[in-house]
Image (cartoon, rainbow, N blue to C red):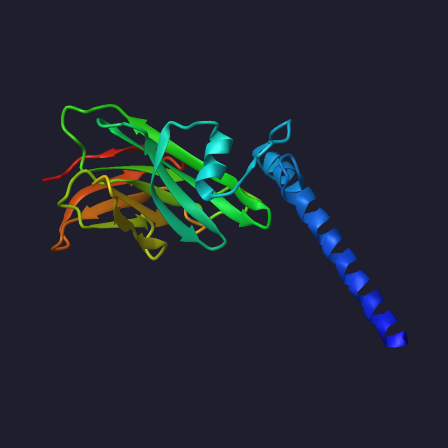
Amino acid sequence: MKTTRRWGIAAGVILASVAVLYILLYMYEKPGGWSDRRMSQALGLAQTLQIPLGGTPEEAVRLFRESDSTTVVHKETVGRGELVFLTRSGQQEGGDLQVEYVRKTWLGWKWVWGAGYGQGEAPSPAAMNYMRVPEVEQVSTPFPMVFGEVPDPAIQQIIVQQKEAGTDKSEAKLIRTVSGRTIWFAFQAATAGVPFEIEGLDQTGKIIAAKVITDVQGSGSIDSSR
């Protein structure tokens, strides 16, 4: 009897602990909860964001952005979250691309941070375009990161490096999407700043497009030097 009673008490304690844990997780992750308050404070907002939870990374982005006019072209797993790359649905001309970081919680997927750019149709297409997404202080993200699209098929490699000798240098990852577009992204160290340089190289290692970036949150295009 004593053993059975002890097992019953232990089971009750475990169930109570699980219930308390779930309540704490819910209070942290729910829309407008503790994590949203922390995010709002980091952004200097007077009101607390109400970031919804989604069943998938795509749904989390759609619910937060309140838009169905984008198409997912690539997803990349990063730690406990995913980077979701999107373009405007039906966009045929000009360059547009956005990236959203969502993280996995016990209650679903939750949007954390993201950015995007749009460019009109140019007389002649650029060799590549770019945007830098800065880090958010006190919020865990894989940023800073530079990303973009590569219209010029001659570019086979992209290097992002600080202009100061001996500092951060990274090689970008290039992805060919199912729609035929080539996108790229490169992570930077948390200490990386400006200026930094983006170089596009051909298969022989020759630089065919390059630009020094001086805006920590800028975007633009890079013309071919050929």
Q: Residue 124, position in %: x, y?
A: 14, 28
Residue 48 visible in rendering: yes
Q: Quadrant of residue 217?
A: top left
Q: Residue 46, position in %: x, y?
A: 64, 27
82 sits to left or right of 185: right
For the point 32% across and 54% down, the residue is 170
Q: Tell me how many marks there are.
A: 0
Extreme residue in the right direction: 2
Q: Quadrant of the N terminus?
A: bottom right
Q: Quadrant of residue 15?
A: bottom right
Front one among 26 and 94:
26
Front one among 146 and 94:
94
Front one among 42 and 195:
42
Front one among 62 and 40:
62
Extreme residue in the left direction: 226
Q: Residue 25, position in %: x, y?
A: 67, 48
Residue 134 visible in rendering: no
26 sits to left or right of 132: right
For the point 90% across and 75% down, the residue is 2
Q: Is residue 1 above or below residue 120?
A: below
Q: Residue 154, position in %: x, y?
A: 13, 45
Q: Quadrant of the C terminus?
A: top left
Q: Is residue 112 above or below residue 186?
A: above
